[in-house]
Image (tube, grey):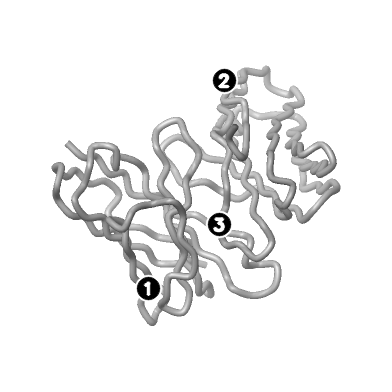
Amino acid sequence: DAGVTQSPTHLIKTRGQQVTLRCSPKSGHDTVSWYQQALGQGPQFIFQYYEEEERQRGNFPDRFSGHQFPNYSSELNVNALLLGDSALYLCASSLDFGTQKETQYFGPGTRLLVL
Amino acid sequence: QKEVEQDPGPLSVPEGAIVSLNCTYSNSAFQYFMWYRQYSRKGPELLMYTYSSGNKEDGRFTAQVDKSSKYISLFIRDSQPSDSATYLCAMSLAGSYQLTFGKGTKLSVIP
């Protein structure tokens, strides 16, 4: 049973650049959420995608955008990178059914460093 | 005041000890409560999930939710060195897809 996978594992970018991170959900899951985890902090919710639409968004600027594909995989795009965007970006998947929608399973994350 | 407060530790205990990890929260509307374990440089791993108040046990782990006090706990019995990790509490509102996390407590179990 394949778990949540993310790519790349590490990334180094320069201020002002753009970055795309990728996520494949756990087998059988149809919902993908993205979180940002700064060093020493808990994950912060960016947004969730379901049926190829952004369903809910956290307190993040429009520089953060996403996409979900018909196979349920997802991308997170961040434009005009700032130093403060350096963090571990986590993808979580879930199944939009009954009580299972509240249980989210996380991938290993992509560690982004902005110089 | 943050929505979810969690003592970051670090917490160091000898092998075999009972560990108690706690979170308090301010929003009484939270309905779903989770505990995740995160090893260094890895993604969080779901340990326990509970709905509303009460206790839930799974092996060496017990999760407790006291909604009247807005307080949740995770107990680890017979702690092992492999339990050394950061433990994150998380919670969500009914009808919301967002998990709100605490900062995490770093636990070290010393052999």
Mark 2 vs 3: CB contact within 8 A = no
Q: Separation of disc 2 and disc 3 at Cα?
A: 27 Å
Q: Which mark is residue A68?
A: 1
* Residue type marked 3: Gln
State the image coordinates of residue A3 (x, y, percent, origin top left).
48, 62
State the image coordinates of residue A100 (x, y, percent, origin top left).
66, 67
Chain assignment, label 1: A
Observer-side mark, 2 or 3, equals 3
Q: Separation of disc 3 and disc 1 at Cα?
A: 17 Å
Residue that label 2 marks: B10
Mark 3 vs 1: CB contact within 8 A = no
Residue that label 3 marks: B98
Circle 1: element type: strand
State the image coordinates of residue B83 (x, y, percent, origin top left).
61, 33
Most distant residue in the bottom direction: A70
Q: Is residue A74 left or right of residue B26?
A: left
Ranked by sequence position, the earlier of labels 2 and 3 is 2
Chain assignment, label 3: B
Categorize mark 1 by other alpha carbons within 10 Å: few (<14), some (14-19), many (20+).
many
Marks counted in the figure total 3
Circle 3: element type: loop
Q: Quadrant of the C terminus of chain B?
A: top right
